Image (cartoon, helix red, strand yellow):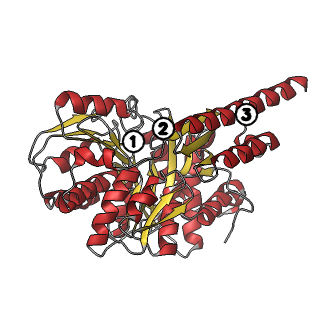
Amino acid sequence: MTTWEGERRLFGTDGVRDIANRGAMTPESALSFGRAYASFLAGRGVARPKIVTCRDTRISGTMIERALHAGMMSEGAEPHALGIFPTPGVSFVLRQGGFDAGAVISASHNPAEYNGIKFFDARGFKLTDDDEAAVEGFVMGGTLKERPRPTGGDIGSLVEAGDRGRAYVEWLRGMLSAIRGRGFRLTIDAANGAASDIARQVFELWGSDVLYRGADYDGVNINDGVGVMHMGSLTGAVKSSSSRLGMAFDGDADRVLLCDRAGRVIDGDIMLWIIGRCLKSAGALGRGVVATVMSNMALEETLGEHGIEVFRCAVGDRYVLERMRETGSRLGGEQSGHVIASDYVSTGDGICTGLLFLKSCAELGEDIDTLADRFPRYPQLLKSMRVDDREAALSSPMLEEACENARARLSGAGRLFLRPSGTEPLIRILVEARDEALMLAVSRDIEETILKIGQNSRKMLRKR
């Protein structure tokens, strides 16, 4: 089997992503990725793979989808198209059996001009880093040009499979029907994305008023002022409508963030705190809860009070899942709203997580309005700085020295974490400390250092 030597160049933390019709996300690139994934599967012994696919609501989705399908069919694969559908819905369909792999066309929370492709295995899990590198090897290693192409009846065909998604909707409706204490007003923000139609089909069973925002997509308004990246839209709507809870998804519905009736955000950390305790009471938690390095230090404190251990991992829901497997934990997630409850799902699922939160609150007798008050969050500041070269900036001796000094100041009182964005030319800076003034000072020093590095780099380029 062909593999690509070295680090992945095209795949980031969540598949391949770029501005649609440019770079790695042109129709030509999508066709190559379709061929590459079919070839990768053939190398694993699946000669004519059945690959279930979906897309979000972006105007570029059809363009990328058809090119991806063409590439798959040119290698003898049989794509089964669900159409506009949430990412976790593909994972669910795969878990039901009958397919060899999955592919999703989405750029998740990114603006409408972006698009992306991510792949799933037959069990509904995202590919490992090594498998993504192997797929990338077919694209960049030149082996696609050398492969003989099938002809005649060996060419693959497209299957319209929208009906296969109905089981996912019914599963979610069944979860909702089992929740006690329904009857208060909800506001749902679907980010004008893949959950826009399905959210209405699921929450029509709620039994009380459900108000919708961001559920009227037009191809260019996905994530535009709505969804998890723009919580102010939801919090304002919740307060003005006297809703008890707001629920926002991202463009492909694998993330969810909530807000209480006062407009205070209930993030992934609080959801892990509530769902984790509920699963433990049912004997269904496993060894503990997995959280990324971005989660607040308060999560260890609150779960520790209930004898629940927290295991940390790198950012990305694939790494959350890997750590869950390593530790024997059945719940994990990110502060950003990616949550995986492995008895239910194989990847982040925004609607499922929202329903699990409501179920957990009902079973634990939790008052949603007091959760934000009772989660003793360390002051935390997350900044994103645009840079020309993420890796060069992060390896700069100037930044290394600044980080060393910052960590010495935070010793025993907080923490500093830097990482490159996997999808954009950004460096994420997280500073957390009990002392807010210290947090702000450390963050400011790191930001100023990164700015100086950028200025010095531009000066060097001008001299050349």
Secondary structure beneath disc 1? loop
Q: Which residue is mark 3?
A: 449
- Tag 3: Cα neighbours inside 10 Å, few (<14), some, or many (≥20)? many
Res 49 seen here:
yes
Q: Residue at x 30, y 40 (%)?
A: 190
Q: Secondary structure at mark 3?
A: helix
Give me the disc on residue 110.
2
Position of residue 85 measured from the top left corner of the image (x, y, whole percent): 33, 49
Q: For the residue labelled by badge 2, is the local secondary structure a helix, a strand or a loop?
A: loop
Q: Are marks 2 and 1 in contact (CB under 8 Å)?
A: yes
Find disc 1 in the rendering and name its residue. 251
Question: Please, what is the three-letter code of the amino acid marked with disc 3?
Answer: Thr
Mark closer to the observer (2, 3): 3
Tag 3 near tag 1, CB within 8 Å? no
The answer to whether 363 is drawn above or below residue 249 in the figure is below
Task: Give, as a three-letter code, the residue at label 1.
Answer: Gly
Q: CA distance from mark 3 to mark 1?
A: 34 Å
